[in-house]
Structure formats: C-alpha cells, structure tokens
C-alpha cells in the first residue's frame, strides 16, 4: 500500500512564492545600485559584487519557476508529482553560481596582471557596499526561515545565495575601504574580487553537489533510517523490520520497508498492521511523504 501527496499546503506554498518575489525585486535594485556605484566609484570589487547580484536575480527567477512547478499536484503523466523539478532547479542555480564566480575571477585576475584598473575607489562605492550587506543579510534570514518551514531545497539554496552575496559585499567593503583610505593599496580591490570569486564558486559547487545527490535518489543519513526502524518497532504486532529502502524525492523522503508479522493472522489483519506502520511514519516524520509496506510472515514462528 502507498500514499503519496506531493502538493504543498496552500499557505506554505504562497509564502514561498512571496519570499521569492521579494528577492527578485530587491536583487533588481541592488544590481542597479552596486553596478552604478562600482562604475562611478571606480571599484572593480563592487562591479564584481554586482555581477554576483545579477546571478542572484537569475537564480531567483529559476527558483520561482521551479518552486511553482514542483508544487503542482500529481497527475496521470506524473504519478509521483513534480518534486524533482526543484532538484534540477537547485542544480542549475549552483552551476550559474560557479559560472559567475569563474567570470568574476578571470576578469579580476586580468585586471590585476595587466593593470587595466589603476585608480583608487571613491566614497560612493563604500556606501553601496554597506547597503548591500544589510539588505542581503535581512533577505537571507527571511528566505532561510521560510525555506526551512516548508522544507524547500531550492529556497534554502537561494537563502545561502543571499548569504554569500552579503559575505562578498563585506569583502568588497574591506577592499574598497583599504583602497579608498590608502590609495597606494588600490590593488587590494582586485585581490578581494578574486577572493569573492572563490567563495561564489565554492558555494555554487556545494549547492550543485547536494542537488545532484537528490536527483540520483541518494538515501537519507543512516541516523534517520535508524530512527524510522525504531519507530516501526514500537508497534507491538511487528516482530521484525528489514529491507528498508529510503530515498530523497525533492525535499521529501520515499520509503519502502518490509515488516515481519505473525504468520497465523489474516490478510485483513496484516493489511491493518501495514496501515498502522504507514500512518505512524507519515505522522512521525515531516519529510516522509510516501510509504510502501510489505508484509512478510514470521518463518521462525
């Protein structure tokens, strides 16, 4: 027997979309602010940071589409729902981040090696970097809280994207500040920009790796599987638990488990025990969305 419902509660679904809409608007204006301040303020690090925000805008858009599609209910063509779209969205977000990081790093290294940027930054770059830090940190906390409450992998990944942008803005502020107050150290602007690129690449790789593991049906941690088995064993009619198979489907867990029961009971009684196991797991683990229970007779009896 199996019960599957991949649709998110309407209230939670709407809260996820609202956060993503907010992120789209905020990142759009941050791109304009940081790019303008970086160009007029003569800061390579801030222009690089603006490129990072541009990647944020792209991933926000992808997150919005992916989250909307993944939350669609199952249909005849997709009997298990559309949840894996969220995994592919997160995977794409990670790839975009790595690409942006490589572009930032290459441009910064080119400027550093061939001295294409020789003027010290101006004060407007300091103001823009400070605005970015505060704004992105607030957006991180809003997004991570929502993502965790609805167990959305793409939203959580996007939250860390915001945090990475805040951290790169801190680095940009440091580099711009040093170059502004000590013009002889203007080279720090490019060096900080390269460090920003490294952080962006690392975060992108982490997001992509996690999403890829879920795409190929990676099992949950052993601790969770042990907790599942222990919960099943609390049902008195279950004599043994074996052949537990679990896999992630988007942000949810699908289970396939065998239980051993008294060989003398009727099919109806065995079915009732299996339903009890299923109900207990669905109620006991928020991530568990589908349970298939196989009833085996106890051959040792």
Image (cartoon, rainbow, N blue to C red):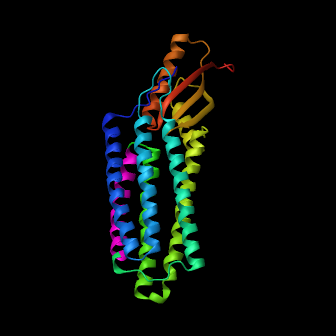
Q: Give the range drawn in magenta.
A: 125-149
Inspect this view and state whether residue 226 appears.
Answer: no
295 or 125: which is nearer to us?
A: 125
Which residue is at 56% across, 35% downward? 229
228 or 299: which is nearer to us?
A: 228
| Magenta-colored stretch includes residue 168 | no
Residue 51 vs 148, above or below: the answer is below
For the C terminus, give its image quadrant. top right
Left or right side of 154 for 300: right
Inspect this view and state whether residue 279 appears.
Answer: yes
Give how far across and how far down residue 29 sits, in percent: 32, 59
Which residue is at 45% across, 50% downward? 59
Give how far across and how far down residue 207 sits, in percent: 53, 52
Quadrant assignment, res 72? top left
Give how far across and how far down residue 237 sits, in percent: 53, 23
Left or right side of 196 for 222: right
Number of numbered markers = 0
Left or right side of 184 for 134: left
Which residue is at 56% across, 55% downward? 206
| Magenta-colored stretch includes residue 139 | yes
Residue 55 vs 188, above or below: the answer is above
Left or right side of 88 for 162: left
Q: Residue furthest right?
A: 300
Dominant secondary structure of the magenta stretch? helix
59 or 264: which is nearer to us?
A: 59
């Amino acid at each position: 027997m199996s019960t599957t419902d991949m649709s998110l509660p309407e209230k939670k679904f709407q809260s996820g979309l609202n956060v993503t809409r907010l992120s789209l608007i905020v990142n759009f204006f941050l791109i304009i602010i940081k790019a303008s301040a970086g160009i007029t303020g003569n800061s390579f690090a801030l222009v690089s940071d603006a490129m990072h925000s541009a990647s944020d805008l792209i991933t926000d858009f992808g997150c919005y589409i992916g989250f909307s599609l993944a939350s669609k209910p199952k249909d005849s063509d997709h009997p298990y729902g559309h949840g894996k779209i969220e995994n592919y969205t997160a995977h794409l977000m990670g790839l975009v981040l790595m690409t942006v990081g490589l572009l930032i790093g290459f441009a910064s290294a080119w400027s550093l090696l061939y001295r294409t940027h020789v003027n010290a930054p101006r004060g407007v770059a300091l103001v823009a970097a400070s605005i970015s830090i505060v704004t992105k940190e607030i957006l991180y906390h809003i997004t991570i809280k929502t993502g965790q409450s609805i167990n959305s992998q793409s939203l959580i990944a996007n939250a860390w994207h915001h945090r990475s942008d805040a951290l790169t803005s801190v680095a940009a502020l440091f580099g711009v500040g040093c170059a502004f107050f000590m013009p002889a150290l203007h080279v720090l602007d490019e060096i900080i920009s390269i460090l920003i690129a490294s952080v962006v690449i690392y975060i992108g790789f982490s997001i992509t790796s996690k999403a890829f593991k879920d795409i190929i049906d990676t099992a949950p941690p052993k601790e969770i599987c042990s907790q599942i088995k222990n919960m099943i064993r609390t049902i008195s009619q279950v004599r043994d638990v074996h052949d537990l198979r679990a896999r992630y489907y988007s942000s949810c867990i699908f289970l396939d488990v065998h239980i051993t029961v008294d060989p003398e009971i009727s099919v109806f009684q065995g079915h009732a025990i299996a339903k009890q196991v299923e109900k207990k797991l669905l109620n006991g683990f928020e991530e568990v969305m589908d349970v298939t229970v196989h009833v085996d007779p106890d051959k040792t009896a």
